[in-house]
Image (tube, rainbow, N blue to C red):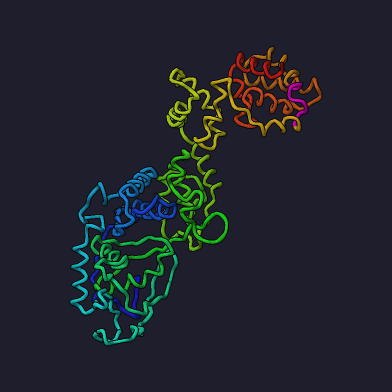
Amino acid sequence: MLAYRFGGVFPLATTFFMSQVRVRFAPSPTGFFHIGSARTALFNWLYARHTGGKFILRIEDTDKERNSEAFLQVIMDSMRWLGMDWDEGPEVGGAFGSYFQSQRTELYQTKLKELAAKGRAYEKDGAWWLRLEGARSTVFDDHLKREIEKVDAAPMVLDDMVRGRVERAEDRDFVIFRSNGEPVFHFVNVVDDIEMQITHVIRGEDHLSNTSKHLELFKAFGVEPPKYAHIPLILKTDGPGKMSKRDRGALIEEYQQRRYLPAAVRNYLCLLGWTPADGKEVLPIDEIVRQFEISAVHQSNARFDERKMSHVNAQTLRGLPAAEFATLARPILLETKVIDATVSDARLAEVLGIVQEKVNSLEHLPEFMGFFFTAEFKKDEGAVANLTKKGGDPVARIRELLPALEAAEWTEPALEAAFAAVGTANNRKPTDYFAPARFAISGQGGGAHLLGVLRVLGRDTTLARLQTYAA
Protein backbone atom coordinates (compact mmCIF):
# COMPACT_ATOMS: atom_id res chain seq x y z
CA MET A 1 0.00 0.00 0.00
CA LEU A 2 1.34 3.40 -0.95
CA ALA A 3 1.57 5.89 1.89
CA TYR A 4 1.50 8.84 -0.52
CA ARG A 5 -1.04 9.33 -3.27
CA PHE A 6 -1.28 11.99 -5.94
CA GLY A 7 -4.89 11.63 -6.99
CA GLY A 8 -4.37 7.92 -7.60
CA VAL A 9 -1.60 5.39 -8.16
CA PHE A 10 1.99 6.62 -7.97
CA PRO A 11 3.11 6.94 -11.62
CA LEU A 12 6.00 4.77 -12.79
CA ALA A 13 7.44 4.72 -9.29
CA THR A 14 10.86 3.26 -8.77
CA THR A 15 10.83 1.71 -5.32
CA PHE A 16 13.73 1.10 -2.99
CA PHE A 17 12.03 -1.10 -0.44
CA MET A 18 14.60 -1.94 2.18
CA SER A 19 14.41 -4.70 4.70
CA GLN A 20 16.17 -2.31 7.07
CA VAL A 21 14.96 1.05 8.33
CA ARG A 22 17.23 3.95 7.33
CA VAL A 23 16.67 7.33 8.97
CA ARG A 24 18.73 10.50 8.88
CA PHE A 25 19.38 13.62 10.89
CA ALA A 26 20.53 16.51 8.71
CA PRO A 27 21.59 19.59 10.72
CA SER A 28 23.10 22.78 9.38
CA PRO A 29 26.35 23.75 11.20
CA THR A 30 25.33 27.38 11.64
CA GLY A 31 24.85 27.58 15.41
CA PHE A 32 24.87 25.78 18.73
CA PHE A 33 22.89 22.57 19.16
CA HIS A 34 19.28 23.52 19.87
CA ILE A 35 17.06 21.37 22.08
CA GLY A 36 14.58 20.96 19.22
CA SER A 37 17.28 19.65 16.91
CA ALA A 38 18.52 17.35 19.65
CA ARG A 39 15.00 15.94 20.15
CA THR A 40 14.63 15.36 16.39
CA ALA A 41 17.97 13.58 16.26
CA LEU A 42 17.01 11.52 19.29
CA PHE A 43 13.67 10.37 17.86
CA ASN A 44 15.45 9.30 14.67
CA TRP A 45 18.15 7.51 16.67
CA LEU A 46 15.57 5.77 18.89
CA TYR A 47 13.57 4.58 15.90
CA ALA A 48 16.69 3.21 14.23
CA ARG A 49 17.76 1.38 17.38
CA HIS A 50 14.21 0.14 18.07
CA THR A 51 13.90 -1.36 14.60
CA GLY A 52 17.49 -2.53 14.19
CA GLY A 53 17.95 0.01 11.42
CA LYS A 54 20.60 2.58 10.49
CA PHE A 55 20.95 6.15 11.76
CA ILE A 56 22.67 8.47 9.28
CA LEU A 57 24.17 11.87 10.09
CA ARG A 58 24.11 14.12 7.02
CA ILE A 59 25.42 17.68 7.11
CA GLU A 60 23.52 20.40 5.24
CA ASP A 61 26.45 22.77 4.81
CA THR A 62 25.51 24.59 1.62
CA ASP A 63 25.20 27.96 3.42
CA LYS A 64 28.80 29.06 2.89
CA GLU A 65 28.36 32.35 4.72
CA ARG A 66 27.12 30.86 8.01
CA ASN A 67 28.70 27.40 8.13
CA SER A 68 31.30 26.81 10.82
CA GLU A 69 33.62 23.89 11.55
CA ALA A 70 33.35 24.83 15.21
CA PHE A 71 29.56 24.52 15.17
CA LEU A 72 29.79 21.18 13.38
CA GLN A 73 32.06 19.94 16.14
CA VAL A 74 29.62 21.23 18.77
CA ILE A 75 26.78 19.30 17.12
CA MET A 76 28.74 16.05 16.93
CA ASP A 77 30.15 16.40 20.45
CA SER A 78 26.68 17.15 21.83
CA MET A 79 25.20 14.13 20.07
CA ARG A 80 27.89 11.90 21.51
CA TRP A 81 27.39 13.46 24.95
CA LEU A 82 23.72 12.47 24.71
CA GLY A 83 24.73 8.93 23.76
CA MET A 84 23.70 9.14 20.10
CA ASP A 85 26.12 7.34 17.82
CA TRP A 86 25.62 7.31 14.05
CA ASP A 87 26.10 4.39 11.68
CA GLU A 88 27.03 6.50 8.66
CA GLY A 89 28.25 10.07 8.39
CA PRO A 90 31.20 12.32 9.30
CA GLU A 91 34.12 10.57 11.01
CA VAL A 92 32.38 7.24 10.38
CA GLY A 93 32.00 7.01 6.61
CA GLY A 94 29.60 4.75 4.79
CA ALA A 95 28.60 3.45 1.39
CA PHE A 96 26.55 6.53 0.44
CA GLY A 97 29.02 9.35 1.12
CA SER A 98 29.98 12.06 1.00
CA TYR A 99 27.77 13.00 3.92
CA PHE A 100 28.42 16.72 3.40
CA GLN A 101 26.09 18.39 0.91
CA SER A 102 28.84 20.83 -0.07
CA GLN A 103 30.75 17.86 -1.49
CA ARG A 104 27.82 16.55 -3.55
CA THR A 105 27.40 19.41 -6.04
CA GLU A 106 28.29 17.26 -9.06
CA LEU A 107 25.51 14.84 -8.14
CA TYR A 108 22.99 17.67 -7.87
CA GLN A 109 23.93 18.95 -11.33
CA THR A 110 23.50 15.46 -12.76
CA LYS A 111 20.08 15.11 -11.18
CA LEU A 112 19.01 18.53 -12.50
CA LYS A 113 19.94 17.42 -16.02
CA GLU A 114 17.92 14.25 -15.48
CA LEU A 115 14.80 16.27 -14.69
CA ALA A 116 15.42 18.64 -17.60
CA ALA A 117 15.72 15.69 -19.98
CA LYS A 118 12.34 14.44 -18.78
CA GLY A 119 10.78 17.82 -19.35
CA ARG A 120 10.19 18.22 -15.62
CA ALA A 121 12.66 21.11 -15.15
CA TYR A 122 12.99 24.32 -17.13
CA GLU A 123 15.10 27.47 -16.97
CA LYS A 124 13.64 30.92 -16.43
CA ASP A 125 15.56 34.11 -15.60
CA GLY A 126 18.69 32.08 -14.87
CA ALA A 127 16.99 29.86 -12.29
CA TRP A 128 15.74 26.31 -12.75
CA TRP A 129 12.15 25.45 -11.90
CA LEU A 130 10.32 22.18 -11.34
CA ARG A 131 7.39 21.83 -13.72
CA LEU A 132 4.44 20.28 -11.97
CA GLU A 133 2.41 17.73 -13.90
CA GLY A 134 -0.67 19.36 -15.38
CA ALA A 135 1.11 22.64 -16.15
CA ARG A 136 0.65 24.03 -19.66
CA SER A 137 3.73 23.25 -21.76
CA THR A 138 4.98 26.72 -22.61
CA VAL A 139 8.36 28.11 -23.59
CA PHE A 140 9.10 31.05 -21.33
CA ASP A 141 10.92 33.99 -22.89
CA ASP A 142 11.51 37.66 -22.23
CA HIS A 143 8.39 38.65 -24.15
CA LEU A 144 6.06 36.55 -22.00
CA LYS A 145 4.77 38.81 -19.21
CA ARG A 146 2.62 36.62 -17.05
CA GLU A 147 2.83 34.69 -13.83
CA ILE A 148 3.04 30.94 -13.81
CA GLU A 149 -0.48 29.59 -14.00
CA LYS A 150 -1.80 27.58 -11.10
CA VAL A 151 -1.77 23.87 -11.72
CA ASP A 152 -5.11 22.13 -11.55
CA ALA A 153 -3.61 19.17 -9.70
CA ALA A 154 -5.26 16.50 -7.60
CA PRO A 155 -4.51 16.98 -3.90
CA MET A 156 -1.63 15.07 -2.42
CA VAL A 157 -2.71 12.81 0.42
CA LEU A 158 -0.03 12.20 3.03
CA ASP A 159 -0.53 9.39 5.52
CA ASP A 160 1.79 10.81 8.14
CA MET A 161 2.96 8.38 10.84
CA VAL A 162 2.22 10.98 13.53
CA ARG A 163 -0.36 13.37 12.15
CA GLY A 164 -2.47 10.90 10.19
CA ARG A 165 -4.12 11.94 6.93
CA VAL A 166 -2.93 15.29 5.62
CA GLU A 167 -4.07 16.77 2.30
CA ARG A 168 -1.90 19.31 0.57
CA ALA A 169 -1.18 20.28 -3.00
CA GLU A 170 1.63 22.30 -4.53
CA ASP A 171 -0.16 24.69 -6.87
CA ARG A 172 2.75 26.39 -8.61
CA ASP A 173 6.01 25.44 -10.23
CA PHE A 174 8.87 26.20 -7.85
CA VAL A 175 12.58 26.96 -8.02
CA ILE A 176 14.98 24.05 -7.53
CA PHE A 177 18.22 25.81 -8.60
CA ARG A 178 18.81 29.50 -7.94
CA SER A 179 20.13 31.86 -10.59
CA ASN A 180 23.56 31.78 -8.88
CA GLY A 181 23.80 28.06 -9.63
CA GLU A 182 23.11 26.83 -6.10
CA PRO A 183 20.49 24.12 -5.50
CA VAL A 184 17.71 24.91 -3.02
CA PHE A 185 17.02 22.98 0.17
CA HIS A 186 14.06 21.05 -1.24
CA PHE A 187 16.04 19.69 -4.18
CA VAL A 188 19.15 18.54 -2.32
CA ASN A 189 17.04 17.13 0.49
CA VAL A 190 15.13 14.83 -1.86
CA VAL A 191 18.14 13.88 -3.98
CA ASP A 192 20.10 12.87 -0.90
CA ASP A 193 17.17 10.94 0.56
CA ILE A 194 16.92 8.99 -2.71
CA GLU A 195 20.65 8.36 -3.05
CA MET A 196 21.05 7.36 0.62
CA GLN A 197 17.96 5.11 0.44
CA ILE A 198 16.23 6.81 3.37
CA THR A 199 13.09 4.86 4.30
CA HIS A 200 11.64 7.15 6.98
CA VAL A 201 11.87 10.93 7.43
CA ILE A 202 11.27 11.99 11.03
CA ARG A 203 11.32 15.77 11.42
CA GLY A 204 9.60 18.71 13.07
CA GLU A 205 6.03 19.72 12.30
CA ASP A 206 7.33 23.02 10.93
CA HIS A 207 8.60 21.07 7.89
CA LEU A 208 5.12 19.81 7.04
CA SER A 209 4.64 22.77 4.70
CA ASN A 210 7.67 21.61 2.69
CA THR A 211 6.38 18.10 2.20
CA SER A 212 4.25 18.75 -0.89
CA LYS A 213 7.31 20.15 -2.68
CA HIS A 214 9.39 17.17 -1.64
CA LEU A 215 6.78 14.67 -2.78
CA GLU A 216 6.45 16.45 -6.12
CA LEU A 217 10.21 16.02 -6.52
CA PHE A 218 10.03 12.33 -5.68
CA LYS A 219 7.25 12.06 -8.23
CA ALA A 220 9.35 13.86 -10.85
CA PHE A 221 12.24 11.45 -10.27
CA GLY A 222 9.84 8.50 -10.46
CA VAL A 223 10.81 7.26 -7.01
CA GLU A 224 8.45 6.24 -4.25
CA PRO A 225 9.01 8.57 -1.28
CA PRO A 226 9.94 7.48 2.22
CA LYS A 227 7.42 7.40 5.03
CA TYR A 228 7.06 10.72 6.85
CA ALA A 229 6.58 11.44 10.53
CA HIS A 230 6.20 15.09 11.53
CA ILE A 231 6.81 15.35 15.26
CA PRO A 232 5.37 18.13 17.48
CA LEU A 233 7.16 21.39 18.11
CA ILE A 234 8.73 22.30 21.46
CA LEU A 235 7.07 25.43 22.81
CA LYS A 236 8.79 27.94 25.08
CA THR A 237 8.07 27.69 28.81
CA ASP A 238 5.79 30.74 28.92
CA GLY A 239 3.72 32.28 26.19
CA PRO A 240 3.10 31.32 22.59
CA GLY A 241 5.66 30.25 20.04
CA LYS A 242 8.25 27.56 19.72
CA MET A 243 11.43 27.60 21.74
CA SER A 244 14.14 29.74 20.16
CA LYS A 245 17.88 29.76 20.67
CA ARG A 246 17.50 32.88 22.84
CA ASP A 247 15.27 31.14 25.39
CA ARG A 248 16.75 29.83 28.63
CA GLY A 249 17.36 26.11 28.40
CA ALA A 250 17.28 26.03 24.60
CA LEU A 251 20.87 24.92 24.00
CA ILE A 252 22.35 21.54 24.90
CA GLU A 253 25.59 23.30 25.81
CA GLU A 254 23.80 24.88 28.81
CA TYR A 255 23.14 21.49 30.35
CA GLN A 256 26.72 20.42 29.84
CA GLN A 257 27.94 23.56 31.59
CA ARG A 258 25.44 23.07 34.43
CA ARG A 259 26.64 19.49 34.92
CA TYR A 260 23.35 17.81 34.08
CA LEU A 261 23.60 14.08 33.50
CA PRO A 262 23.44 13.35 29.77
CA ALA A 263 21.15 10.39 30.50
CA ALA A 264 18.73 12.75 32.26
CA VAL A 265 18.70 15.31 29.44
CA ARG A 266 18.18 12.53 26.92
CA ASN A 267 15.40 11.03 29.05
CA TYR A 268 13.60 14.38 29.33
CA LEU A 269 13.89 15.03 25.59
CA CYS A 270 12.09 11.73 25.01
CA LEU A 271 9.18 13.01 27.09
CA LEU A 272 8.75 16.07 24.86
CA GLY A 273 6.20 14.52 22.55
CA TRP A 274 6.23 10.87 23.65
CA THR A 275 5.04 8.98 26.72
CA PRO A 276 6.35 5.54 27.71
CA ALA A 277 3.70 2.84 27.57
CA ASP A 278 4.24 1.97 31.24
CA GLY A 279 3.77 5.60 32.31
CA LYS A 280 7.18 5.87 33.97
CA GLU A 281 9.10 9.09 33.41
CA VAL A 282 12.61 7.97 34.30
CA LEU A 283 13.80 4.93 32.37
CA PRO A 284 17.15 3.42 31.33
CA ILE A 285 17.94 3.99 27.68
CA ASP A 286 17.60 0.30 26.79
CA GLU A 287 14.02 0.37 28.03
CA ILE A 288 13.27 3.59 26.14
CA VAL A 289 14.59 2.01 22.95
CA ARG A 290 12.44 -1.07 23.54
CA GLN A 291 9.26 0.94 24.08
CA PHE A 292 9.74 3.69 21.49
CA GLU A 293 7.20 3.72 18.66
CA ILE A 294 6.68 6.58 16.21
CA SER A 295 2.96 5.83 16.23
CA ALA A 296 2.93 6.72 19.94
CA VAL A 297 4.38 10.21 19.38
CA HIS A 298 1.88 12.94 20.31
CA GLN A 299 0.27 15.22 17.76
CA SER A 300 -0.01 18.18 20.14
CA ASN A 301 3.00 20.42 20.70
CA ALA A 302 5.13 19.90 23.81
CA ARG A 303 5.85 22.71 26.27
CA PHE A 304 9.36 22.88 27.70
CA ASP A 305 9.43 22.69 31.50
CA GLU A 306 12.83 23.27 33.08
CA ARG A 307 11.53 22.22 36.50
CA LYS A 308 10.52 18.86 35.11
CA MET A 309 13.91 18.43 33.47
CA SER A 310 15.53 19.22 36.83
CA HIS A 311 13.26 16.64 38.44
CA VAL A 312 14.29 14.01 35.90
CA ASN A 313 17.94 14.94 36.47
CA ALA A 314 17.54 14.61 40.25
CA GLN A 315 15.82 11.24 39.96
CA THR A 316 18.49 9.97 37.59
CA LEU A 317 21.26 11.23 39.88
CA ARG A 318 19.75 9.60 42.94
CA GLY A 319 19.37 6.33 41.08
CA LEU A 320 23.05 6.04 40.17
CA PRO A 321 25.11 3.26 41.73
CA ALA A 322 27.19 4.70 44.59
CA ALA A 323 30.48 4.01 42.82
CA GLU A 324 29.34 5.82 39.66
CA PHE A 325 28.08 8.77 41.71
CA ALA A 326 31.47 9.00 43.44
CA THR A 327 33.29 8.85 40.10
CA LEU A 328 31.28 11.83 38.87
CA ALA A 329 31.52 13.76 42.14
CA ARG A 330 35.25 13.55 42.91
CA PRO A 331 36.57 15.65 39.97
CA ILE A 332 33.94 18.33 40.61
CA LEU A 333 34.81 18.54 44.30
CA LEU A 334 38.52 18.65 43.48
CA GLU A 335 38.00 21.36 40.87
CA THR A 336 36.04 23.52 43.30
CA LYS A 337 38.56 22.83 46.10
CA VAL A 338 35.94 21.30 48.39
CA ILE A 339 38.30 18.37 48.82
CA ASP A 340 41.92 17.70 48.01
CA ALA A 341 43.72 14.56 46.95
CA THR A 342 44.18 13.45 50.56
CA VAL A 343 40.47 12.70 51.00
CA SER A 344 40.15 8.94 50.78
CA ASP A 345 37.64 7.10 48.63
CA ALA A 346 36.15 5.61 51.80
CA ARG A 347 35.60 9.01 53.44
CA LEU A 348 34.14 10.49 50.25
CA ALA A 349 31.83 7.50 49.83
CA GLU A 350 30.64 7.92 53.42
CA VAL A 351 29.65 11.55 52.83
CA LEU A 352 28.16 10.93 49.40
CA GLY A 353 26.13 8.08 50.81
CA ILE A 354 23.93 10.45 52.81
CA VAL A 355 23.75 13.37 50.36
CA GLN A 356 22.96 11.43 47.18
CA GLU A 357 19.31 10.99 48.09
CA LYS A 358 18.85 14.77 48.45
CA VAL A 359 21.08 16.40 45.85
CA ASN A 360 19.33 17.63 42.69
CA SER A 361 22.32 18.41 40.51
CA LEU A 362 26.05 17.84 40.37
CA GLU A 363 26.34 21.60 39.85
CA HIS A 364 25.17 22.20 43.42
CA LEU A 365 27.17 19.40 44.99
CA PRO A 366 30.08 21.60 46.22
CA GLU A 367 27.84 24.00 48.18
CA PHE A 368 25.62 21.15 49.32
CA MET A 369 28.39 19.15 50.99
CA GLY A 370 31.33 21.50 51.42
CA PHE A 371 30.73 21.83 55.18
CA PHE A 372 31.77 18.20 55.69
CA PHE A 373 35.33 19.10 54.76
CA THR A 374 35.81 22.64 56.08
CA ALA A 375 34.59 24.82 58.94
CA GLU A 376 34.68 27.87 56.65
CA PHE A 377 31.35 27.23 55.00
CA LYS A 378 28.96 29.77 53.53
CA LYS A 379 25.89 30.57 55.64
CA ASP A 380 22.46 30.73 54.04
CA GLU A 381 21.20 34.07 55.33
CA GLY A 382 17.74 33.25 54.07
CA ALA A 383 17.60 30.39 56.56
CA VAL A 384 18.31 32.63 59.57
CA ALA A 385 14.85 34.22 59.56
CA ASN A 386 13.20 30.80 59.58
CA LEU A 387 15.12 29.67 62.66
CA THR A 388 13.23 32.00 64.99
CA LYS A 389 9.88 31.11 63.45
CA LYS A 390 10.38 27.40 63.94
CA GLY A 391 11.83 27.23 67.43
CA GLY A 392 12.38 30.65 68.96
CA ASP A 393 15.89 31.81 69.81
CA PRO A 394 18.25 29.41 67.92
CA VAL A 395 21.19 30.08 70.25
CA ALA A 396 19.03 29.19 73.26
CA ARG A 397 17.94 25.98 71.55
CA ILE A 398 21.56 24.93 70.93
CA ARG A 399 22.48 25.65 74.55
CA GLU A 400 19.61 23.39 75.66
CA LEU A 401 20.67 20.69 73.22
CA LEU A 402 24.42 20.58 73.84
CA PRO A 403 24.53 18.69 77.17
CA ALA A 404 22.37 15.87 75.80
CA LEU A 405 24.52 15.48 72.68
CA GLU A 406 27.74 15.62 74.68
CA ALA A 407 26.49 12.70 76.76
CA ALA A 408 25.09 10.66 73.84
CA GLU A 409 26.57 7.74 71.95
CA TRP A 410 27.33 8.81 68.40
CA THR A 411 24.79 6.63 66.62
CA GLU A 412 21.63 7.73 64.87
CA PRO A 413 19.26 6.00 67.33
CA ALA A 414 21.11 7.51 70.31
CA LEU A 415 21.14 10.97 68.73
CA GLU A 416 17.43 10.72 67.97
CA ALA A 417 16.77 9.82 71.60
CA ALA A 418 18.83 12.82 72.75
CA PHE A 419 16.75 15.23 70.65
CA ALA A 420 13.55 13.67 72.00
CA ALA A 421 14.72 13.95 75.61
CA VAL A 422 15.67 17.61 75.23
CA GLY A 423 12.29 18.35 73.65
CA THR A 424 10.44 16.66 76.50
CA ALA A 425 12.52 18.42 79.16
CA ASN A 426 11.82 21.83 77.64
CA ASN A 427 8.21 21.22 76.62
CA ARG A 428 9.11 21.44 72.95
CA LYS A 429 8.99 19.22 69.89
CA PRO A 430 12.28 17.52 68.98
CA THR A 431 12.04 19.14 65.55
CA ASP A 432 12.32 22.59 67.18
CA TYR A 433 16.01 21.75 67.59
CA PHE A 434 16.65 20.35 64.11
CA ALA A 435 16.88 23.61 62.16
CA PRO A 436 19.16 25.40 64.68
CA ALA A 437 21.44 22.36 64.85
CA ARG A 438 21.63 22.06 61.06
CA PHE A 439 22.37 25.75 60.65
CA ALA A 440 25.03 25.72 63.37
CA ILE A 441 26.98 22.84 61.81
CA SER A 442 26.45 23.57 58.09
CA GLY A 443 25.10 27.10 57.58
CA GLN A 444 22.19 25.58 55.65
CA GLY A 445 18.45 25.58 56.09
CA GLY A 446 17.90 22.15 54.57
CA GLY A 447 19.70 19.13 53.25
CA ALA A 448 20.29 15.47 53.95
CA HIS A 449 18.75 13.66 56.92
CA LEU A 450 20.09 15.52 59.99
CA LEU A 451 20.91 12.49 62.13
CA GLY A 452 22.89 11.00 59.27
CA VAL A 453 24.72 14.29 58.81
CA LEU A 454 25.66 14.39 62.51
CA ARG A 455 26.89 10.80 62.41
CA VAL A 456 29.06 11.30 59.32
CA LEU A 457 30.32 14.74 60.36
CA GLY A 458 31.56 13.11 63.56
CA ARG A 459 31.23 13.76 67.26
CA ASP A 460 34.18 16.09 67.76
CA THR A 461 33.47 18.31 64.75
CA THR A 462 29.75 18.50 65.48
CA LEU A 463 30.17 19.43 69.15
CA ALA A 464 32.88 21.98 68.36
CA ARG A 465 30.63 23.77 65.85
CA LEU A 466 27.64 23.72 68.19
CA GLN A 467 29.75 25.10 71.04
CA THR A 468 31.07 27.89 68.82
CA TYR A 469 27.55 28.80 67.73
CA ALA A 470 26.24 28.81 71.32
CA ALA A 471 29.10 30.87 72.73
Classify 430 as above or below 171: above
Q: Is residue 429 magenta?
A: no
Query: Which quadrant of the structure image shows residue 373?
Result: top right
Classify 282 as above or below 164: above
Q: Residue at x 20, y 64 (%)?
A: 107
Q: Residue at x 45, y 59 (%)?
A: 296
Magenta segment boundaries in residue numbering: 390-397
Q: Residue at x 63, y 18 (%)?
A: 462
Question: Quick one: 471 or 287, which is closer to the camera?
Answer: 471
Classify 44 as above or below 154: above
Question: Quick one: 421 or 196, which is closer to the camera?
Answer: 196
**x, y percent for residue 20:** 28, 57
**x, y percent for residue 172:** 35, 79
Location of the N terminus (image quadrant): bottom left
Apparent side of residue 38 relative to residue 138 in the rendered image (left or right) = right
Apparent side of residue 347 relative to residue 439 in the rendered image (left or right) = left
Give the number of callouts.
0
**x, y percent for residue 403:** 72, 14
Query: Which quadrant of the structure image shows residue 185?
Result: bottom left
